[in-house]
Amino acid sequence: MTTVPPTSRIAAAFAKARSQGRKALVLYLTGCDPDFDTSRRLLLAAARAGADVLELGVPWSDPSADGPAIQAAMRRALAAGGGMAKALDLCRAVRADNPDVPVVLFGYANPIFVRGTAKFAAQAKQAGADGALCVDWPPDEDPELAQALDQQGLALVPLIAPTSTPARVKAAAAVAGGFLYYVSLTGITGSQLPDLAATSAGVQQVRELSGGRLPIAVGFGIATPADARAVASFADGVVVGSAAVRVIERAVSAGRDPVPALEIFVRDLRAALG
């Protein structure tokens, strides 16, 4: 395993994209969908195809911020034995084969709270993760998770919404690491990409409020290479999740190995980013 500090992997990924004159591609996949080994191969294939950062979704039974595609993926993952323990094992397996790609654990508060923030952060570090994104743990309301991650040298990637107040943006940015995740809409994942003028203005406001300390990636609603190209015109990175999960679902439903289809999908997204 590499000895590079975890947060340095995220910074290096965005720096590499900038040096190549493009924006970073952040790809979300639900861990253990449709099963552990296929999920491992999918994550590695996504990195091989050009994903700069991987978001490894931790399966949870009540994914309130997610739309039908990721909800279904989480049900499949849970049926296959997925959960926090398997997500950590999956992260460890990916890190063993790819020492450089940043991995951010993406999940909800309950599995982290039940485990304990200090234990979760320590185990995430041991598994080779670079940071965590917790949908329903606002860092401005409870700093415990941010502090636990920081003690392990891991990044907290906060979600910032169009409805976030300036005070909340500043508070989240102050404890953030890696990058800021700007949600393009006030809704669930998989929804249609909204008016880009408003999203661009929101990203600019966050950039000003955060002092430009971290890159800003935009997610929710980005489904095609054209969507990714449009968002990349004003963001430092684009996040694709539901569309990638649907690629996997279609292949599995047809009885095919989903890895080749996902690899093609990710290559097309990466090509759209320059």
Image: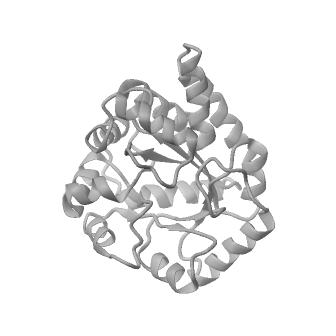
Residue 13 or residue 138, whichever sits in front:
138
190 to the left or right of 115: right
Q: Position of residue 33 (x, y in %)?
A: 44, 31
Q: Where 73 falls versus 127 (above or below)? A: above
Q: Nearer the viewer, residue 127 or 83?
A: 83
Residue at the (63%, 77%) spot, across then down: 207
Q: Quadrant of residue 224?
A: top right
- Can you give x and y, in whole percent of width and height, for residue 99 in the image? 38, 42
Above or below, comparing residue 122 to residue 207 in the picture = above
Q: Residue at x 33, y 41 (%)?
A: 87
Residue 221, above or below 150: above
Which residue is located at x 63 percent, y 64 percent? 186
Q: Can residue 102 be seen in this view?
A: yes
Q: In the rendering, at what x and y percent does residue 166 appear? A: 57, 85
Q: Farthest top residue?
A: 255
The residue sitting at 44% across, 71% down in the picture is 176
Q: State left or right for residue 257 relative to residue 74.
A: right
Q: Nearer the viewer, residue 66 or 219?
A: 66
Which quadrant: the N terminus? top left
The image quadrant of residue 50 is: top right
Note whether residue 32 is visible. no
* Residue 70 x %, y %: 52, 41
Colour option used: one colour
The correct choice, above or below, for 114 with respect to 38 in the image is: below
Observer-nearest residue: 135 or 19?
A: 135
Q: How many marks?
A: 0
